[in-house]
Image: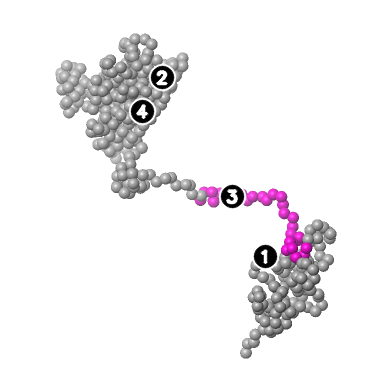
Amino acid sequence: MSQMPQQAALPKCPSCAEPVESGDLFCGACGYDLSVVPAPPQDHPTLTMTGSPGDGVDWPAPGPESSSAPPAAHLPADPPGTDAGGTSLPGDGPGAAPYAHEPGAAPRGHEPGAQEARQPAGSGVRFDRPAEPEEYPLQAPDPRMAESVAEPEEPAQMCVACRAGQVDSDGYCENCGHAQPRERDHVERESGPVAAVSDRGLRHHRNEDAFSVGHTALPDGTPAVLAIVCDGVSSATRPDDASSAASQAAGDTLLAALPRGTHPQTAMHEAIVAAAQAVNALAEEPATAREHAPHQNAPACTIVGAVVTSGLLVVGWVGDSRVYWVPDDRGAPAARLTEDDSWAAQMVAAGLMSEAEAYADERAHAITGWLGADAYELEPHTASFKPDRSGVVVVCTDGLWNYAETAEEMSEVVPADAAARPLHSARVLVGHALDGGGHDNVTVAVVPFPAPPQGAGSA
């Protein structure tokens, strides 16, 4: 039958030094397991760890490494490989250091009598550890870890309609289902004193208008401001691409030509030609593209622009987008500075119909001039003026002037402080078109014209 292990008689607990009785398996004070304590060897005296003899804890002296005696007690709270007094436990290997409290044992790498060797044996400090380097080399980061680091998520886009739901990846509100505006649905931009706004309107599914605004300086340092507005032809293929390409090409051409000293009217002509070439390039496609889509035609758009320098106003156009002159002194007459390339304009010019009758006809907005590979002939129109007073130049598509057709009507809707607040004025004009029904895309640029030193007149 199994028997309980017989415990050697101990005078006191090795852990807390409380007296124990013969036959106790555990210390009544600290719960120390007395069964793991071997009988003390008869040929080694008990060493005093700290304090005066008889005041400290009596620890059994360690035997030689070859001894078959059981190992010394090892408390769970002790560091691995040492006992509570900092002494290495037997079995650490043949290279284990001598115990700090063993008589005659010097710290490894030091001579007896060194400062570290004079530390009390019961302090728990070991002196056999190798010297630590002053600097630790850092391991190079794993490039795979860098690739796996997730970038911070962008804040969720809120719905422009209900202002409560978040927008999903398809561009629809998760709360009300409203389709969110695309990047070109509403665009606002300022460049120096000029500003422009373009909006999709209330009826079209996309914005086929585009614009370009900028400012530069002539060779003599005189400032020059420009605005280009293009309206994509909806019956053509990719009208939005056509208007974007044309406005960008024309704007870049003007910004390059004016600082070289090119006359603004000549620069405007060159800009319209460059815009036409950019739109024509969109029609260059593989022969197989026509076979798969035989009903597609070449991209097309209209163009209108204005350049303002000191005392000079230059306009250019192809199509039915317009430029209006609105003086700051509303007592002076406003004026329309362009003539449409349209069916209605031709009827009026031929004397066949009055302007009111022509523009009331359903064919009124059929254009007779445009930019595109299938245009009959490119005929850029340019003109220059010298207004005798300050004012603003309104460059717009028919999405605006359909709701303010005459110069007088346009003068009424342009804010009185348009020259000082061009972006605000452009927003007001777009809002006027939307309030009127917004049947078409709406784009308008407002260019302030400072008071010139000389009188007015056509140049």
Q: Amino acid at mark 4?
A: Leu
Residue 256: x, y in percent? Answer: 43, 22
Instruction: Report, in whole angstroms, how far the alpha carbon at label 4 lies from the one at label 2.
Output: 18 Å
Q: Amino acid at mark 3?
A: Pro
Instruction: Report, in whole angstroms, how far the alpha carbon at label 2 lies from the one at label 1.
Output: 81 Å
- The reply, left or right, for residue 334 in relation to residue 97 is left
Residue 145: x, y in percent? Answer: 54, 51
The residue beneath circle 1 is 79
Sequence-earlier tag: 4 or 1: 1
Instruction: Report, in whole angstroms, how far the alpha carbon at label 4 lies from the one at label 1.
Output: 74 Å
Residue 157 versus residue 342: which sits nearer the camera?
157
Which residue sits at x=36%, y=10%?
454
Secondary structure of the residue carrying numbered label 4: helix
Image quadrant of residue 446?
A: top left
Instruction: Report, in whole angstroms, how far the alpha carbon at label 3 lies from the one at label 4.
Output: 51 Å
Q: Amino acid at mark 1?
A: Pro
Residue 15 versus residue 376: which sits nearer the camera?
15
State the quadrant of the C terminus.
top left
Sequence-earlier tag: 4 or 2: 2
Sequence-earlier tag: 2 or 1: 1
Sequence-earlier tag: 3 or 1: 1
- Between circles 2 and 1, the one closer to the viewer is 1
Q: Could you tell me if residue 19 is visible in this image?
A: yes
The residue beneath circle 4 is 423
